Image (cartoon, rainbow, N blue to C red):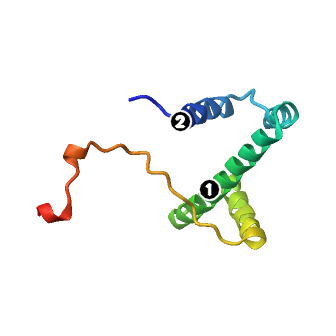
Amino acid sequence: MAKSNETKVAEKLAEGLNDYTFSPQVLANVLTTYYPIYTQDRLMELVKCIIQYNSLRMTTEWDKGNTSEGLLLADLLNDTLIQKYGREEVQFADTRTRDSKYVMDLDSF
């Protein structure tokens, strides 16, 4: 099965982030200096989604007794976003593909 563009970008980003020579400041500078405003808007949309998802993860990790500085920061930033723009429902993308011949309805039981 072919990977989506989003999955490919996420894998490349994770690969770069896990490299010890990676500099977030350089990436931020390149993205904000050399790309158009539309790209900036999409980047900020991505950052907002990452904050929301990590805030949700912080809650579940906290219940398990785990946390990190990044998750705590995401939770704080998410609270700030809620205060500024109101609560927004996080849309979970259903990335699973289902073969229709294997999907059963409740009437078949």
Q: Is residue 42 visible?
A: yes
Identify the residue position indicated by label 2 in the image: 7
Instruction: Find the distance from the CA under tag 1 to the CA under tag 2.
Output: 18 Å
Residue 24: image location, x then y, percent: 78, 37
Residue 63 bears which disc, if any? none
Disc 1: which residue: 54
Q: Residues within 10 Å of mark 1 (few under 14, many from 20)?
A: many
Residue 19, position as x, y percentages in the image: 68, 28
* Residue at the spot 82% in from the left edge and 36% down from the top edge: 36
- For the C terminus, the quadrant is bottom left
Comparing 108 with 82, the one in front is 108
Along the horizontal axis of the image, is 103 left or right of 79? Answer: left
Q: Is residue 27 left or right of residue 49?
A: right
User: Picture coordinates of residue 22 (x, y %)?
Assistant: 75, 30
Mark 2 belongs to which amino acid?
Answer: Thr
Q: Residue at x 55, y 31 (%)?
A: 8
Q: Would you place residue 76 above or below residue 38 in this image?
A: below
Q: Is residue 70 above or below residue 76?
A: above
Q: Residues within 10 Å of mark 2 (few under 14, many from 20)?
A: few
What's the residue type where badge 1 is placed? Asn
- Give the camera-side residue of 66 and 58: 58
Asked which secondary structure carries label 2, the reply is helix
Q: Secondary structure at mark 1?
A: helix
Would you say 5 lies left or right of 85 here?
A: left
Quarter of the figure with the N terminus: top left
